Amino acid sequence: MTASYETIHTRLDGHVLYATFHAPPINLIGPELVRDLVGLLQELSRPDAPRVVVFDSADDDFFFPHVDMTKVAEYTAEAARAGGPGDASLGMLFRKLSQLPAVSIAKLRGRARGAGSEFLLACDMRFASQEHAVLGQPEVGIGAPPGAGAIQHLTRLLGRGRAMEAVLTSADFDAEVAERYGWVNRAVPDAELDEFVTSVAVRISGFPRDALIAAKSAINAISLPSLADVRADAALFQQLVRSDEVQQRAAELFKQGFQTRGATELDLGDVLGRLKAAD
């Protein structure tokens, strides 16, 4: 790996790349982070790339809280660099993550909501801190459906009823429930999480690359949604996220401290439940 990034710190150890997101103040998914992620995925697509990549966050409170709602057009334009203007969406960018010729592992501490949860769902495996991980899909509570993979992945992983619960309630889910539902592979005691994830990554990285890629491709062929479904979800999100209702509900959230480090972001699931109901 040769590139350096503004919002991603990387460290190579043998055949494992450790990629840590660091986009203060709270790791919002904005244009700078998307630009860096496009570049990193391009590097990881090369034949000589590491066999395994482990993603985590430098912020123990926030993995990715959600997208930057003030910069939707800007981060979408950056995502277009990965697939061209016709595929300008986080959903299609995350699809490239799922199809990397490398095994992707997410190590979750803090909050991963909205597109943050969808990033994790695009990874091959997810391991969460039992005490400090929170997942959620707040989009419906703000006024739009998820558009970067949650509907496709959660329905396959959780089943219809639990996917409905996760998406339609816009609630926060702790690691224990997320594990029971299948949102994450395992909830691991926080003190053991780093060692556990490293052991999984190192074990996998010692296996033949061709076998890893072949097995991953076969599982993807069974489990990933079609490109048409990914594009349809992205188009619907991008249509509704610009609606007056979303703008009004987002404005009310901003009045309460949305996108800043404070109670609104820390407890967004509860805040959405108290937000004035739409007519």
Image (tube, helix red, strand yellow):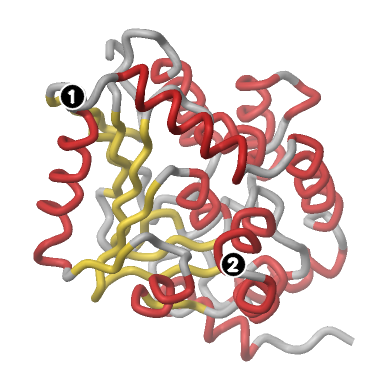
Is 228 left, or right, of 123 in this rendering? right
Q: The disc labelled 1 sits on which kind of residue?
A: Leu
The answer to which quarter of the image holds residue 252 is: bottom right
Numbered disc 1: secondary structure: strand
Compared with residue 241, is residue 7 higher up or lower down, i.e. above or below?
above
Q: Quadrant of the image for the C terminus?
A: bottom right
Identify which residue is drawn at 37% across, 44% down: 23
Which residue is disc 1 drawn over? 12
Q: Quadrant of the image for the N terminus?
A: top left
The x and y percentages for residue 92 are: 66, 34
Identify which residue is drawn at 72% across, 30% down: 88
Numbered disc 2: secondary structure: loop
Gap between marks 2 and 1, in whole Å?
Answer: 32 Å
| Residue in the foreground of this view, choosing between 8 and 136 | 136
Which residue is disc 2 drawn over? 137
Is 151 left, or right, of 238 in this rendering? left
The x and y percentages for residue 234 are: 76, 45
- Specify few, some or many for label 1: CA neighbours under 10 Å numbering under 14, 14-19, or 20 or more: few
| Residue in the foreground of this view, choosing between 125 and 34 | 125
Q: The disc labelled 2 sits on which kind of residue?
A: Gln
Q: Which mark is residue 83?
A: none
Identify which residue is drawn at 74% across, 28% down: 87
Compared with residue 93, is residue 119 higher up or lower down, i.e. above or below?
below
Compared with residue 270, is residue 205 higher up or lower down, i.e. above or below?
above
How many discs appear? 2
Looking at the image, tell me whether mark 2 or mark 1 is earlier in sequence order.
1
